[in-house]
C-alpha cells in the first residue's frame, strides 16, 4: 500500500524539504544565489541519477532496438543553421515600458504588465540559444552555441551509429545530457531553468510507419511514469494543436503532470518526420539516407522522438511521492518513492552508537550495501532517524540492536506499512529483495 493519502502539496513545502534534507540547494547560495539555478545535494543527486538510470534501463538496456550515445555539448555552428534553431528557436519577448520587466508574451494573460500594470512595447523574437566563443578570439567566426537540445547529436551521428552498431531500421538512438536555453522567464523551482538535463531518444523508422510508432512511443512514455510510481490521475496526454507545433514536427503530444500551479509538460513525443536528416544532408553534403536491404530501396527515415527533462521529472517524482500521516507533533512526512527512484533503498541503523554494536552493524551494512544503495546512520535517537529516512523516502530500515549480537538477526521496518519483521542476517538480502519487489508492484500509478 504505497498509495498517497494526500492529493497534492505546495511547492514551498517541497522546496523547503529539498533544502532541509539535501535534495536541492540554490546555486552559489553563499554569494546570494544565482537566480533560477539549482544544485543537487547528496540526496538529490541520488534521486536524479535513479531517474536517469530508470530511463536508460527502460530505453536502452532492456531493448534490442535502441542504442545510446554521449555527445558533446558544443557542436559545429552549422548544425544549428541546418536544424533551424538559429532562425526559429525563439520566444516572443515583451518589455514593460514602465518597470522594464521582461516576459514571454505567449505566457501572459491579459495586455498589462503583471508587475506594475504598465503597457508593453512591441514584441521581438528572442533566440534562446546561449552563445560562447571557441578559442582565444572573441569574434563571429569563433561563435559556438551551447546545445539547446540533445537531439541534434543523434541526427548528425546517424550514419556512424547505424553502421557501427549494425542496427536495421526501425531503431533508435538515445542520449542523456545537459541542454541550455536562455529562458525569458525561468521559475517554479527546477521546472524551468536555463541549464537542465534532457533524456531524448530519436527513433528512426520507415516513412509510412511513423504514425504507428508515434502512438507506440506515446503509450510507452505514459506507462513509464506510472511504472515508476506517478499516479495515473496526475498525468494526462495533451495533443498539440496545429498552431503550436514546432517547426520540425508533424504531430506532437505532451505528457503533462498536475503540478501545484497547474498542468505542466514532462515530456513531448514528436513526429519529426525526415526534417532533420534531410536538413543535415543538404547543409553538410553528406547523404544521410538509408538503404533498406530487405526492401531493396533507399529512403530518408522518419523520426519519432520522446524528449523528457530529467530535472522536471525528478521534481514530479518528488512532488508526487510527498505524503503526510497523522497530525500535529505526531505527523509523519513520508516520500513514497518507487524503490528504484528512492535516493536510498535501505538504511542500516544501529540502535545506538555503542562500541559493542558497531562491528556487527558495520558488518550488516557491508552485506546490504553490496546489493542495494544504502545509507548508514548512527546519529541521534532511533525515532528521529526513522523520521529522517521517511522524509527522504527510504523504503526499508534495517535496525541492528543488542540482541543481534547473540541471535544474528535484525529488524526490517517498512516505510509504507511501518511493519517490522525480524530476519536472520543470512536471509537479509532475500528478505529485502522480496519487500522491495512488493513495493515496486504496489507503487504502480
Ligand atoms: P516548454 O514548452 O515547457 O518550454 P518545450 O516544449 O520547449 O518545453 P522540449 O523542447 O519539448 O520542451 O524539451 C523536452 C523536455 O525537456 C521538456 O518536456 C522538459 O521536460 C525539458 N525541458 C525543456 N526546457 C526546459 C527548461 N527550461 N528547464 C527544465 N526542463 C526543460
Image: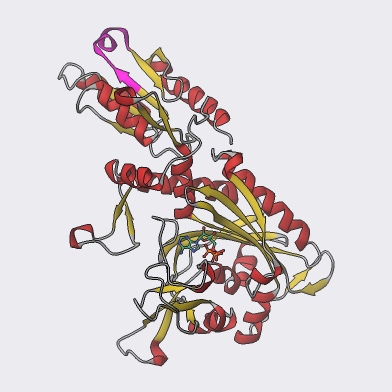
Residue closest to the eye, 142 or 169: 142
Is 304 on the left-hand or right-hand side of 100?
right
Residue 221 in sight in this render: no
Residue closest to the eye, 85 or 154: 85
In percent of width and height, residue 324 lies at 41, 30
Most distant residue in the left direction: 355
In percent of width and height, residue 345 lies at 41, 33
Q: Residue at x 36, y 15 (%)?
A: 411
Is 383 located above or below residue 373 in the figure? above
Q: Residue at x 59, y 78 (%)?
A: 83
Residue closest to the eye, 165 or 244: 244
Most distant residue in the right direction: 295
In percent of width and height, residue 161 lies at 60, 66
Residue 402 in the magenta stretch? The answer is yes
Q: Which residues are magenta?
A: 398-408
Is 342 on the left-hand or right-hand side of 28?
right
Q: Residue at x 60, y 40 (%)?
A: 233
Tally of numbered tags:
0
In percent of width and height, residue 209 lies at 79, 61
Residue 319 in the magenta stretch? The answer is no
Most distant residue in the front direction: 117
Residue closest to the eye, 209 or 326: 326
Could you say which quadrant of the image residue 266 lies in?
Answer: bottom right
Q: Residue at x 25, y 21 (%)?
A: 382
Is 105 located above or below residue 78 in the figure? above
Amino acid at each position: 500500500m504505497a498509495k498517497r493519502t494526500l492529493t497534492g502539496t505546495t511547492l514551498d513545502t517541497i522546496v523547503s524539504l529539498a533544502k532541509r534534507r539535501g535534495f536541492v540547494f540554490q546555486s552559489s547560495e553563499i554569494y546570494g544565489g544565482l537566480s533560477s539555478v539549482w544544485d543537487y545535494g547528496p540526496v538529490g543527486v541520488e534521486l536524479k541519477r535513479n531517474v536517469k538510470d530508470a530511463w536508460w534501463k527502460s530505453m536502452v538496456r532492456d531493448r534490442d532496438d535502441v542504442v545510446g550515445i554521449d555527445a558533446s555539448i558544443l557542436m559545429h555552428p552549422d548544425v544549428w543553421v541546418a536544424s533551424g534553431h538559429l532562425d526559429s528557436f525563439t520566444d516572443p519577448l515583451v518589455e514593460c515600458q514602465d518597470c522594464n520587466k521582461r516576459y514571454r508574451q505567449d505566457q501572459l494573460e491579459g495586455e498589462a504588465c503583471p508587475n506594475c500594470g504598465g503597457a508593453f512595447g512591441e514584441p521581438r523574437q528572442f533566440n534562446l540559444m546561449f552563445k560562447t566563443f571557441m578559442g582565444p578570439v572573441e569574434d563571429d567566426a569563433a561563435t559556438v552555441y551551447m546545445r539547446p537540445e540533445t537531439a541534434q547529436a543523434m541526427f548528425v551521428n546517424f550514419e556512424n551509429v547505424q553502421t557501427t552498431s549494425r542496427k536495421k531500421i526501425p531503431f533508435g538512438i538515445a542520449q542523456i545530457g545537459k541542454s541550455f536555453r536562455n529562458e525569458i522567464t525561468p521559475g517554479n523551482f527546477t521546472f524551468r531553468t536555463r541549464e537542465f538535463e534532457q533524456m531524448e531518444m530519436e527513433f528512426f523508422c520507415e516513412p509510412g510507419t511513423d504514425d504507428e510508432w508515434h502512438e507506440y512511443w506515446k503509450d510507452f512514455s505514459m506507462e513509464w511514469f506510472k511504472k515508476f510510481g506517478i499516479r495515473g490521475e496526475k498525468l494526462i496526454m495533451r495533443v498539440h494543436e496545429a498552431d503550436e507545433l514546432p517547426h520540425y514536427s508533424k504531430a506532437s503530444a505532451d505528457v503533462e503532470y498536475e503540478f501545484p500551479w497547474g498542468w505542466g509538460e514532462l515530456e513531448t513525443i514528436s513526429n519529426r518526420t525526415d526534417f532533420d536528416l534531410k536538413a543535415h544532408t543538404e547543409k553538410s553534403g553528406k547523404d544521410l539516407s538509408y538503404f533498406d536491404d530487405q526492401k531493396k530501396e533507399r529512403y530518408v527515415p522518419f523520426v519519432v522522438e520522446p524528449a523528457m527533462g530529467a530535472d522536471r521529472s525528478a521534481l514530479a517524482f518528488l512532488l508526487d511521492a510527498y505524503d503526510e500521516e497523522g497530525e500535529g507533533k505526531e505527523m509523519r512526512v513520508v516520500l513514497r518513492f518507487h524503490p528504484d527512484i528512492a535516493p536510498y533503498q535501505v538504511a542500516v541503523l544501529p540502535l545506538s552508537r555503542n562500541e559493542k554494536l558497531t562491528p556487527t552493524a558495520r558488518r550488516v551494512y557491508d552485506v546490504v550495501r553490496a546489493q542495494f544503495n544504502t545509507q548508514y546512520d548512527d546519529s541521534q535517537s532511533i525515532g528521529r532517524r526513522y523520521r529522517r529516512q521517511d522524509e527522504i523516502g527510504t523504503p526499508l530500515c534495517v535496525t541492528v540492536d543488542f540482541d543481534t549480537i547473540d541471535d544474528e538477526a535484525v529488524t526490517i521496518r517498512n516505510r509504507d506499512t511501518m511493519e517490522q519483521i525480524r530476519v536472520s542476517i543470512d536471509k537479509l538480502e532475500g528478505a529485502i529483495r522480496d519487500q522491495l519487489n512488493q513495493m515496486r508492484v504496489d507503487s504502480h500509478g
